[in-house]
Amino acid sequence: MSISVHIGPLGARVVPAALGLATLIVSAQWAPVLGFWWAMGLGMGFALQRGRLCFAASFRDLFVNGRGELMRAVLLGVMAATTAFAALMARMVPDPSMGELAPKIHVWPLGANVLIGGLLFGVGMVLAGGCISGTLWRIGEGYVGSLVALGGILLGLEGAALSWNWWWEHSMSKAPLIWLPHSLGHMGAWISVMAALAVLYLLTYWWEARRAGPEVRFPGQPQPPLVTFQDRLRALWNKLFVQAWPASAAAVALSLLNVTAFAFDHPLGVTGELSAWSSRTFGLVGLHPGHLEGLDQFAGCNLVDAPPGLLTNTFMLDVGLVFGAFAASVMASEFKIRVPRQPVRYLQSAMGGTLMGYGSGIALGCTIGAFFSAIPSLGLNGWLFGLGLLGGAFVGSQIIRRLA
Amino acid sequence: MKLDVRGEICPYPMMRTVDALGKLPPNEELEVLTDHAPALATIPWEASKRGYAVDVEKVRSGEWKLTLRKAQGPLDPMAVVQEISQKTDMGG
């Protein structure tokens, strides 16, 4: 299979990339830290769009058609990040047996709120056809349904903020915090987590062989031979900017960004900023959740009250993600304003978004912060959230079948 | 037969294509119009399981036409794999 027609002059298609680069240079000169997070956002949006790396699909496909390819890509990314995170954390806390926790890692108590948040999030991401980061990069590609989902996410986050103190009192404050290096040491924790991930990786093959039927691929059209230097450069350009990346390449790129972000300050997460947007939006109509108990004890994508300035690090990350995906889709000539034709899809996006917003609010993060950054942090909360996602995706798959 | 699934996102382009294949008269090809890039991976997978070969053509920015044709004779997965291995660059 090959995509033969490229549409639009190259000049018009590199404008967004040039704009992204220009804003990056300017912001890095004017405020290096904001510039760093802007670069992380652009990189995330670019990698996620190019690899079409959809966390929602990685869980949903297991149940909808038995495919495990995207889940394997995600697991590979988690393994890469786990290795680098373990090395960084070993530097931060040389002797973990003393009960100290590495700073800013995504480890928090193993409360029922993490599992329930994961379940709600899993149902929501399947209903909306994308998780929270997926919603952001699809907005960059021109999906109108994703804008509706974003509205739902903000609503759900406000609901989570309003009920946070209940979750804190009944679940979070009583639950044990488990960081594997405390009991297993850094090496033991790393080996255990890598082994568990490797087992899951192999399990997806077993699941696929059982559920998905034989894997048959059709050959692509023969490619013209690469003769000159220009031919080779053009082929490289196409591989990077025009053809889709393998999902596994995008997952490894995402984990590289995650490790870079952690080495710089803290792991990636996109939900905290959205909760500030939610708090600002609902603050306009007089809804204020008041003081949220216990939140200052944790890192991660906490629900946050709107900070005074708009231009925060997390703002740069989230908006950079949307812009990076926009630039990537325009360069590949894949940008299009896509409008759902069936009214029920708007309802799905809104409800799915609301479930994701609420779930990520009570579980302290989304598929990025509470899963992709949490498992490499070597706590058990990332696994509990992942279990919730899996269960939720199963339920969601049953629901969407009935909405075809 | 033509199927327009523009505006639909995963997994609906794939599910509606599978439905349409079930209703496709023999010896006819199915043209699917989609604006959802992930469907370029999900539709060929499901089509190949049902013995259909798929061609993809980009129609305009963010829009693709997939043409599904019944493959000649029964599919031999080993032959297909061999054919792929002879071509190093698969393309999109």
Image (cartoon, grey):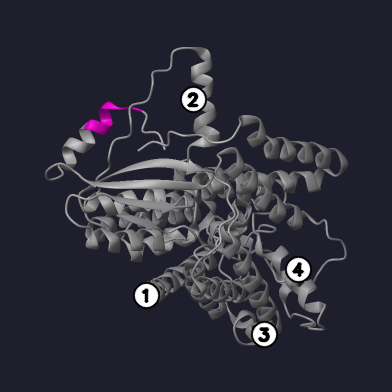
Inter-mark Cα distance, 1 to 2: 42 Å
Q: Between tags 2 and 4, which lies in front?
A: 2
- Mark 2, residue position: A235
Q: A301 or B46, which lies in front? A: B46
Residue A198 shows up from this direction: no
Give the residue type that dot 1 points to. Answer: Gln
SS under mark 1:
helix
Report the disc number at residue A398: 1
* Left or right relative to A252: residue A1: left
Report the disc number at residue A276: 4
Q: Is residue A85 magenta?
A: no
Q: Is residue B87 magenta?
A: yes
Q: Is residue A216 above or below residue A212?
A: above
Do the residues indicated by labels 3 and 2 lie within the same chain of the protein?
Answer: yes
Q: What is the span of residues highlighted in magenta in the rendered image? A: B83-88
Give the residue type that dot 4 points to. Answer: Ala
What is the chain letter for disc 2?
Answer: A
Q: Main secondary structure of the magenta part?
A: helix
Inter-mark Cα distance, 3 to 4: 16 Å
Q: A320 or A349, which lies in front? A: A349
Residue A312 shows up from this direction: yes
Query: Residue at coordinates 59% horizontally, 51% vertically from top-left?
Result: A141
Q: Between tags 3 and 2, which lies in front?
A: 2
- Mark 3, residue position: A163
